[in-house]
Image (cartoon, rainbow, N blue to C red):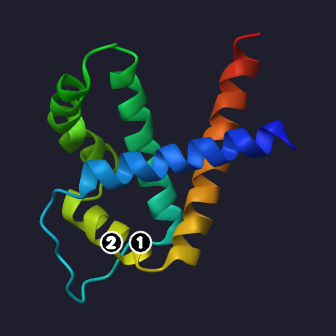
Amino acid sequence: MNPKGNTRQIVLAGLVCAFVICFSCQENDRNSQPVLTHQQMVKAMAEIYLAEQKINRLGVARDSAEVEFNRIKPQVFEKIQISDSVFKRSFDYYMDRPKEMEAIFTALVDSLSLMEQRIESSGK
């Protein structure tokens, strides 16, 4: 059994759960407007994940963490220059296409792993 593979699966499952929880309560806007590309989704999801992790490091209760995330979410979307409605529509689009969403999550995990490696190497 490959421990890195297990870690990757755990991270991937955690990311899916986090994104579903964060965006499942929003209004569903499924019209014919365009969706984000795979690359744009990876970038957006990475920024959202990093924001969530900053909040998680505060060690506050889950409900307080959700309140804080909802407070900073507009800033995250402003930083990546994507509206939350476009992200939500794109997220829903890809959730309806599991193979494409799997490719996005795989790229996301790879991207986050690369970021982590860069941070670790710069700290040496």
Of residue 35 and residue 29, the one placed in the foreground of this image is 29
Picture quadrant of residue 50: top left
Q: In the rendering, at what x and y percent does residue 73 appear?
A: 23, 41
Q: Is residue 4 above or below residue 54?
A: below
Q: Residue at x 52, y 69 (%)?
A: 101
- Residue depicted at x 23% and y 34%: 69
Distance Cα–Cα, label 1 vs label 2: 5 Å
Disc assigned to residue 92: 2
Left or right: residue 102 versus residue 17 is right
Residue 91 appearing in the image: yes
Q: Residue furthest right?
A: 1
Q: For the residue labelled by badge 1, is the local secondary structure a helix, a strand or a loop?
A: helix
Residue 10, which numbered label?
none
Q: Residue at x 51, y 57 (%)?
A: 42
Pointer 1 with pointer 2, Cβ within 8 A: yes
Indicate the position of residue 70 as horizontal and vertical percent values: 17, 38
Decide: few, some or many residues near mark 2? Use Cα within 10 Å; few <14, some 14-19, many ≥20: some
Identify the amino acid type marked 1. Met
Is residue 111 shown to the viewer in this render?
A: no
